[in-house]
Amino acid sequence: MLRSVFCLLLFVLPAAAQESAAFVAFRNHIVNQPRVLTDYSADKERKYEFRAEELSAKEPFLHEFGFFTANQVTLHGDTVSLKGERAAIIRNPSTHGLAAAGIQSPMSISVVVKDGTVDEALPAIEKLLFWSSLDEAVSSIPDYVAKNVPGNYVSKTQTVAMCTDCGPGKHVPKSDGIVKLDVKEGVIPPKLTHQVDPEIPASAHKEKPTRTSVRIGLTVGSDGKPTELWVILPAASDYALEAAKAVSQYRFEPARKDRKKVAVRLNIEVYFETF
């Protein structure tokens, strides 16, 4: 006689990891709260490491004065992940204060904790990742950018004095698209020697024919290469990224003062037109 022996195997599933009170508090303090990143990154993805009470990461490819609003904050092992939307900060014509632009783009942030426990690191991570207030974010913008984005901000009255040539319809197009800035007396401006046309964003092919522009601020170094790229005149993020990619490949004969090569700031207008 054949007997069938059935073995009942019981698998005990591990209980779901309990979120600590510190992480829940961190998440609740971050989610759906517009914050300004301390590095003003406009990159779609940012990866940081937390070590010795400091955050480290590669220099952002592109900077912009904008809000990041997390809609999801999760913890996987020693990695804190934030996913959400980023939007440029612009002048609100109704209130004359600052507001997030209507055009948003996805952004993800991850922080790997290398020292200590995640719970211990969370307060420092928040402090190092975001400015504590909009006033602090505005006052910390580099001087060469603050005069253009979004102008001179007066925190007490919540008003913005826009620079006269930075608003829509105030473009100053030239043959090379350059609007010269911060070229002081006695400085011979840089000359553009190599220009690259921007790629049309993939998203543009789904839109109606349009003509738009992005103004990118940059430093032309003493080696003639662009660095420290900032979005000066906001546009849809895909356009801003493609404009920055093109401008990063520009090359210049460096500016000179007393026959020595010097670094200067420039604004460059990059135009897009789809049919």
Image (tube, rainbow, N blue to C red):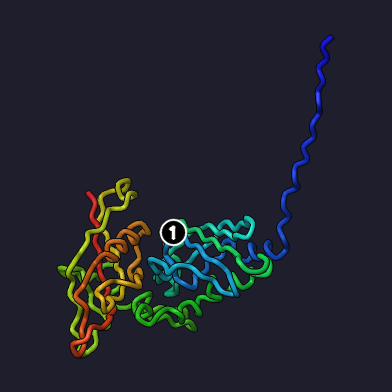
| Label 1 SS | loop
Q: Residue at x 35, y 73 (%)?
A: 228
Q: Which residue is mark 1?
A: 44
Residue 248 % position (x, y): 29, 66
* Residue 28 shown left or right of residue 189 in the figure: right
Image: 26 above or below 150 = above
Q: 148 or 46: nearer the eye?
A: 46
Q: Residue at x 50, y 79 (%)?
A: 136
Q: Residue at x 64, y 71 (%)?
A: 123
Residue 203 % position (x, y): 34, 49
Q: Quadrant of residue 21?
A: bottom right
Residue 195 appears in the rendering: yes
Residue 81 % position (x, y): 57, 58
* Residue 250 shown left or right of residue 66 in the figure: left
- Say which amino acid is labelled 1: Lys
* Residue 196 shown left or right of residue 137 in the figure: left
Q: 130 or 209: nearer the eye?
A: 130
Q: Residue at x 19, y 66 (%)?
A: 194
Q: 32 or 179: nearer the eye?
A: 179
Q: Quadrant of residue 146?
A: bottom left
Q: Residue furthest front?
A: 1
Q: Residue furthest top?
A: 1
Residue 92 appears in the rendering: no
Q: Quadrant of residue 250?
A: bottom left
Badge 1 crowding class, 10 Å Cα cut-off, few under 14, some 14 to 19, many 20 or more, is: some
Label count reads: 1
Residue 192 % position (x, y): 18, 71
Image: 194 above or below 253 = above
Q: Quadrant of the N terminus?
A: top right
Q: 158 or 76: nearer the eye?
A: 76
